[in-house]
Amino acid sequence: MDNLLERIVEDNRSLTKEGKVATYIPELAKGNGNALGICVMTKDKEIFQAGDFETQFTMQSISKIVSLMYAIKYTGMDEVFKKVSVEPTAYGFNSIVNLEVKNYNKPLNPMINAGAIAVASMLKGATSDEKFENVLSFMRKICNNEEIKLNEKVYLSEKRTGHRNRSLAHFMKSTKVLEGHVEDILDVYFKLCSVEVTCKDIASIGAMLALDGLLWHNDERIIEPHIAKMVKAIMMTCGMYDASGEYAVKVGIPSKSGVGGGILATVPNKMGIGVVGPALDEKGNSIAGIEVLDQLSKELNLSIF
Ligand code: DON
């Protein structure tokens, strides 16, 4: 497996040149566009890593899965889905158009920015700091890594420049999807996007989902199986934004991307996979990361279809 992963990374490394690191959050522009790495954690407790697997990157939209699981677990399924639907969208991750013209102002799904901001507003915690700390602890527990922390520079950079997210949030405040103070809600959202991780951290979240809610490192149950199944279904239909359909056909593995260059993938009952490749395609997904997952899926026959 180590050799297989090294070969797949090297086969796809030249593709990193065809993408671009995200620049709309100024601090992300400093990311290493040439990096490409992978970590696989199997059901049998084996771990394999290849390429630039030690690269640190911010979770960005991958955090949307963790906050969704936390909100469902502690706020409750009914509350969460009263405010957010689970329909894929043909628009980009930060699009505002659907909020006005579709679905009675309810964000279409929790994997796009509007939906994740709505989820952030429902997290358990008395203050925005407490809400963030609660989800961070939950993340550390899933990843078995107490070192996971906020990248302060990325957070401040996004907070300073996040005008599109502010507009989504204010729109949702006007339509009563959001309750509470808009800037406080955004603060939680920006911080969650700015949590710094490695491939291994996101692979361990994927492995927990593959095991239907059992922690990979000790088999402790952290979420109920029906929640894990639901999250995997949402990842499959919405996790790669407006490229989710094409990705399902091509790769066929429930996955979630982030503009930091990470892709978290989960193969039910088999393995969790974390990939990093900060050079992105035009939809905000890691350009080489998708091809690495495609090749791995084909060589190991991992598609769920
Ligand atoms: O809100 C944003 O725009 C970013 N913090 C997260 C977006 C993102 O990761 C989209 N991913 N592909």
Image: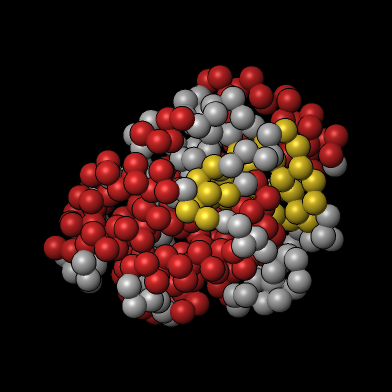
The N terminus lies in quadrant: top right
Q: Residue at x 64, y 53 (%)?
A: 201
* 50 vs 72, nearest the viewer: 50
Q: Position of residue 136 (x, y in %)?
A: 50, 64
Residue 198 percent across, percent down from the top left: 62, 46
Left or right of residue 145: residue 112 = left
239 or 119, which lies in front? 119
Total labels: the figure holds: 0
Is residue 109 in view from this perspective? no
- State the residue in front, 301 or 3: 3
> In the image shown, does 82 or 31 lie closer to the viewer?
31
In the image, 92: left or right of 244? left
- Residue at (50% x, 46% y) in the render: 58
Residue 180 is drawn in which quadrant? bottom left
Q: Quadrant of residue 8?
A: top right
Vertical comparison of 124 with 271: above or below: below
Q: Work out whether residue 221 can be spotted.
A: yes
Colour scheme of the picture: secondary structure
Q: Could you tell me which residue is drawn at 36 percent across and 53 percent down? A: 190
165 over 35 or under it: above or below: below
| Position above or below: 33 against 150 | above
The x and y percentages for residue 244 are: 49, 45
Place of residue 195 in the rendered image (x, y in percent of width and height, measured from the top left): 49, 52
- Find residue 247 and report its image quarter: top right
- Single out the residue that lies furthest toward the left: 174
